[in-house]
Amino acid sequence: MSQLAIKSLSKSYGAFKVFDGLNLEAAAGEIVVIFGGSGTGKTILLRLIAGVEEPSSGTIAIDGHDVADIAPEHRGIGMAFQNFALFPHMSASENIATPLRAAGASESAVKAGVAKVAKLLKIDHVLNHAPRELSNGQKQRTALARALASEPGILLLDDPLRNVDAKLRFEMRLELPRLLRQTGATVLYVTQDYKEAMALGDRIAVLGGGGFIQTATPEDIYLKPANLSVARLFGDPSINTIDTTIKSETSKTSVSLGGVQIAIDNRYAALGGRNVTFAVRPEAVNISGTAGLVATVMAVTPLNERIVLLLRSDGGWEFLASLPSSAAHVPEPGTKLHATFAAAGTHLFDQHTGERLNG
C-alpha cells in the first residue's frame, strides 16, 4: 500500500487551464473516486500521477517522496482504461503479463503472477483466448488484471466500467470494492456515474471548474452537498429547487414555495430577508399527511424500485416526489394532496453563489 499526496497541482495547455491548485491526499489502501463531467480533467489528473504527462506546477508525492524525476515504470502504479486497451495480437494471459515482463520478472514469476490475478478476477478459464474472443466483461477484467499483475501500490482506474453492459456494470459495482480491497492498493477511480461513485468510494472528490468542489464521504456528499452544483450531480431523480426568500418572524422562519409560506428550521432565523434556493430531495417529499403544501398529482411514473410523482403546487411550482415501489397507496393523476419535506433531505443555498447555507 502507498500513500498519495497531491499539492497545488496545476495543468495548462497554452492559454487553456485544465485545473489550478489541486490538493488531494489518499491514505494507504483508501479508495478515492474522482467524480465529474466530461472535460473536467479527470483523465489528465490520472495521467499526471502516472507520469505520462508533466504538471505545469505543483507536486505529486508517493509515500512522502516527490515523483517528479521518477519514470512512470518506476512509480509503482498500475492503470486501467475505459476502452480496455488490450493488445489484439496477444492472448489474455500475455496481456496480463506485460507489466511483469517489462519489469524483468522471471518466467516463473510471470506465470505465478498471471495465475494469481486471473484467479482473483475469475478469468483463469479464458487466459488463452485472444481479446476478440472475450466478452466485454472478460475484456474489462483482463484490463484490470493487467493493472494489478505487478502488485502496484497505487491503482488508477479510468472509468473502467463505461463500456460494459448495464447488467455487468451493476454486478461490478457490488464486486469491485471487495476485489480492490483484496489487492491492498491505494485506488483513484474515475467515473461520471454518481451511483458508481457512491458504491465504490471511501471518499468522493468532485472535480469541476478547475478544482475540487468538495471532497467527502459518499454520505456527506449526498446529505451535505457543498453547493447546489454538487447537490444536482448526485441523485436520480434530481433534487427539486425553487428560488425564494427567507422570512423570519418572532417565533417562525419560513420560505415561500409557489406563493405559500412553508415553515423551515428556526436555525435559519438570522438569515431573514436572504434570497435563497430551496432544495429538497424527491425521497424527502412526504405526501401522506393532511397538512403542508397543497399540490396536484400531474403524472405517475413507475421506475422499478421506486415510483416518481410529478406534483404541481397551487402556486405553480412543479416538483418530484419519490415513493418506494412497495408503497401501499399511490395517488392517481389529478389527486389533490399535501406535501411536507423531511429536514434531512432539505437544503438552502445562496441564490447568487450557490453555496450551502448552514444557518
Image (cartoon, rainbow, N blue to C red):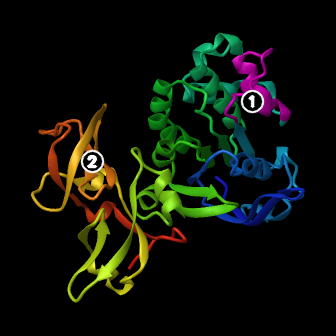
Which image quarter holds the C terminus? Answer: bottom left
- Mark 2 or mark 1: name the one nearer the start of the chain: 1
Disc number for residue 181: none
Would residue 180 be counted in the magenta stretch? no
Q: Nearer the viewer, mark 2 or mark 1?
A: 2
Residue 129 appears in view:
no
Residue 35 appears in view:
yes
The residue positioned 48% from the left and 27% from the top of the image is 166
Disc number for residue 311: 2
Q: Residue 73 vs residue 86: left or right? A: right
- Between the residue at mark 2 and the residue at mark 1, the CA separation in whole angstroms equals 63 Å
Nearest the viewer among 232 and 34 is 232
Disc number for residue 109: 1
**Amino acid carrying mark 1 in the image:** Ala
| Rendered view: 334 above or below 279 | above
Magenta range is 81-102
Q: Residue 81 vs residue 184: left or right? A: right
The image position of residue 248, as x and y in percent, is 29, 83
The residue positioned 73% from the left and 48% from the top of the image is 46
